[in-house]
Image (cartoon, coloured by chain):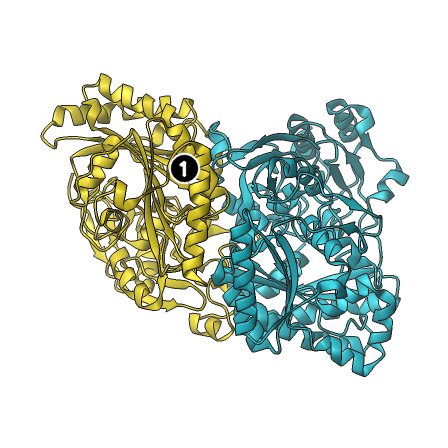
Chain colours: A cyan, B yellow
Amino acid sequence: MSAQDAPPIGAPISDDALAELRDALDARRVTNEPHILDSYAAQPFHKAEPGVWIHRPIAVAMPETTREVQAIVAICNRHQVRFKALTTGWGAHAGPGFDNVLQVDMRRMNRILDIDVRNRTILVEPYVTCAQIQAELMPLGLNLHIHGAGSNCSPLASATSHMGMGFSSISMGYMPRNMLGVEWVLPTGELLGVGSCGSDAGWVSPDGPGPSLRGILRGWAGSDGGNGIFTKCALKLYPWSGPAEIDMRGTNPLELDLEIPPHNGIWLCVFPDAERYEDALYALGDAEIGYLQAKLAPGLAMAIGQPDLFKRVVNDERMRATVDSMRFEFLVVLQGHSRGRFEYEKKVLEQVVADNAGSMQDPSLFGSAGSLWWALVRNSIAPGMFRPTGNFYSTLGGDEAVASALRQDLAGMRLKEGFIADGACADDLTDNAHTLLYENGQFAHTEELVLFDHRDPEQAAKLKALSDTAMRAIVSERLGGGGFSFFAGAYAHDYLGPNIDNYHVWQRRVKTALDLQDLSDSKYYIDSEKNEGD
Amino acid sequence: MADATHIRAKSPTDVGTILSAAGRDGTPVVPRSSTGPARIGRGAAGGDEILLDLSTLDETVVVDRRNRVAIVEPGVTFAGLEQRLEPEGLRVTHPLLPTPGKSVLAAFLDREPPLVPKYHWDMTDPLLCAELWFGTGDRFRTGGAAGPGDTLEEQWAAGMHQKNPLGPAQTDLLKVVQGSQGTMGVATWGSIRLEVRPQLTTDHAVCADELGPVADFVHGVTRVRICDEISIFDTAALRALGQAVGSPIEPVAEWTALVRIGSLPFLPEESLEVQTHDAAAIAAAAGVGLAAGSDALPAGFLDAALGVTSDHRWKVPGAFRDVFFLSSLDTAPRLAAIARERWVGLGVDPATVGTYIQPLDQGRSCHVEITAFLDDSTTDLHAGLDADMPDLTRELAAAGAFFSRPAPAAASSVYARCPDSVRTLDLVKTILDPAGILAPGRLWTRSGK
């Protein structure tokens, strides 16, 4: 069938298209069984609209190879079927943004293809998780950056398609900057190697020859499935100076029985006010120390780790004030490759804290120190975020200088106050900023988290107003950049674009050049000029 | 070839005006920011072209100690920037011996290899954000500089300091312009990440007759991000470097890594002691020694070789031919041998072929630069090497070299290896330079052109 004869985009998939998919793949890896499709459509996370359900896919295909992915995309082009790749995604942005979208479930492409210990690189398929990689790396004395979604998620998805901040950002950066090359099935089905891999020169560089196509693959944010499908990705690895295996006992992740290994330590550093907190963050960056670092707001930490205590604190003004006095803080893990280096970093941390009238406290407020150390190393805190109220949402998040991150911390709290009073979200002691440094403080991140219950009709209905308020504040108060608001699709681009140097004009031209028919689901990216405003 | 029309930009908005007019007329424009003879010849423009001279835009817009960032216009040189940074206790990681007229912005737009691997977090470093002008005449600011906030002053007041090197949003057009050698856009300023200048430094050399042990040492120290400048030379390259900086050196082994260890801002003495101790242990494990600079190098050698303020010329225009690419550290000697054998076969004295290896990306890869240091009177030999360059490029690429920054003579061979990339670059070029006026004919040849 030619594209001219195909039904309009968004129409139900034809029997012919399904038959072609079944021919291209093992027929058991293509389904349109309703009960299976429904299992892909419950995605309540990061969904500003009320309800659990997103658009139900029209069918699901599970490729096992890049060639099969190309075949799927070619069939979608012939039959004008929208498609959307899914790896480990948790959230509305991982699923179809429209009706009648083919979900391309990448779970069968789950292999670690190569680990180059000497050059500290790894080559992975889409469904490999950070935890899977980390388990392989630690015996080799290596580790990887794990993004905020946690170790149960795909680093390829983070590097190519979404965002990539995490506790390890201070020493391992931002996941998209960890990318060393990508194998990319374009929205037309053509295969493109980005960087040195495209010239059969291994995985030494994501850029070139000449101009870097990394710049149209993604930006600060990824396209969340709106820009084709990524089938392989090489990533950077970093040193691990702990044991090959962690000796731990227990099943409660907050109360594990484990000893923090030699040359490792974790501290909660607390400062008396915003000014000295900001100074300390700048100093920490200058100092070139720290393995893991982030602010984990005390209210949130308590809500996750000690929910019964948290309920008492919320309703007790004096206890609230006590916890609030700790709001200017960060957790930091030091790890030295030698005893001398660890002792040096510890002394410097003590000096940074003392210079800014801070204190280094026992982090047991958040759980046992060993458990917390492991939770940060493993980045296993994210799933706990659902514990207090059933769901959460992120606002702000535009990365910039440390000073901007601090302004976002303060603004986020202010933005939320009225919504908490109005019952739009849970009372999390209001401060729920997650602030971290990238690359020895060269830039920084703050997102303001919102705890809510998507099963509560009132809260679910009011979430969009909160999200919109945050987006407007990004512009009116110049809070770093578009942050998480970029993922609101056309609606956000129309508002943010004119205030951020008309980026949306260029982004739409890129989308149009690569995917004129808008077949790669653009709900969380941008629509092509052909379908602009539909 | 007739001289190009030479236009000096007087302001950034001039650039937009010139590009708009050129786009209407279909006049090719070749931007140039550096002054003096070009090493690679990328800035040359022909008679039907406009040579857009950006060297007159030479303001250092800001140097910000707290945020470790500077914003520079295209005419700012390394020496000029250094003068601004030193009093602030800051430094920029720069390429080896930049020429006196070398533009900071042009060097980093071209992804020239900086000398400190531990600060090279990404191939795009240390360039962060930029003000770009496309072939359409449109202005676009990238990364954190895109806003919100229409002016730099508005952004500074809001704590934004042009530090986010990605985006804005879901594309990243600076990455497309970077490495494009003027074919995708023109930059009128860029923000550059800076580092705290060490109060104390110690100089060292690590020497061995095989690259293997030196590479083991470099892998070891870059893995844990200790040591500052690290650059590797074979005997011919090290001799040439010594000659260039007026400090003749007789190498003690076939390969030498020049290493400078700098103190960190807190507890500087202790930081230097710990790093030196750990680096020595890594060297010992690699079977080499971490020799003190005073024992292995002429006095003041690293100050001169790693500096930016002199007019030392590492390569004399017209008196060398070189080829450079990216590879892994372990592959570099094999690739260098290919170039050497080929050049020797064409009549080059093997003693004049030198290899410089610059570890990048925190030691995960390296820039390899093989140079035939020639007598400028051997014009027949020059011509022979020039004629052979496409074939040499093809052979090196087939052996695994990655030509990330193709020189003019290498470009056709390089792009022949990646037709899929070329098709996609054509699409992007159509967006950013629809009239095809920006440095036409550089790099790849557009379909249908």
Quadrant for residue A482, please give it. bottom right
Is any part of residue B327 visible from this angle? no
Quadrant for residue A51, please give it. bottom right
For residue B369, side relative to residue A181 (left or right): left
Nearest to the observer: residue A343 or residue A370: A343
Label count reads: 1
Q: Position of residue A109 (x, y in %)?
A: 70, 32
For residue B109, side relative to residue A98 (left or right): left
In the orientation shown, which residue stands out farthest toward the right?
A35
Question: Image point 39% across, 49% down: which residue?
Answer: B228
Q: Position of residue A391 (x, y in %)?
A: 81, 60
Question: Image point 48% across, 75% down: which residue?
Answer: B157
Q: Position of residue B405 (x, y in %)?
A: 37, 38
For residue A173, side relative to residue A246 (left or right): left
**The N terminus of chain A: image quadrant:** top right
Position above or below: B69 against B99: below
Q: The disc numbered 1 marks a residue on which chain? A: B
Q: Residues within 10 Å of mark 1 (few under 14, many from 20)?
A: many
Nearest to the observer: residue A445 or residue B185: A445
Question: Image point 22% across, 23% down: which residue?
Answer: B350
**The C terminus of chain A: image quadrant:** bottom right
Nearest to the observer: residue B91 or residue A517: B91
Is any part of residue B428 visible from this angle? yes
In the orientation shown, which residue stands out farthest toward the left?
B377
Residue holding disc 1: B366
Q: Position of residue A82 (x, y in %)?
A: 71, 41
For residue B249, side relative to residue A37 (left or right): left
In the orientation shown, which residue stands out farthest toward the bottom?
A318
Quadrant for residue B269, please give it. bottom left
Q: Secondary structure at mark 1?
A: strand
Q: Amino acid at mark 1?
A: Cys
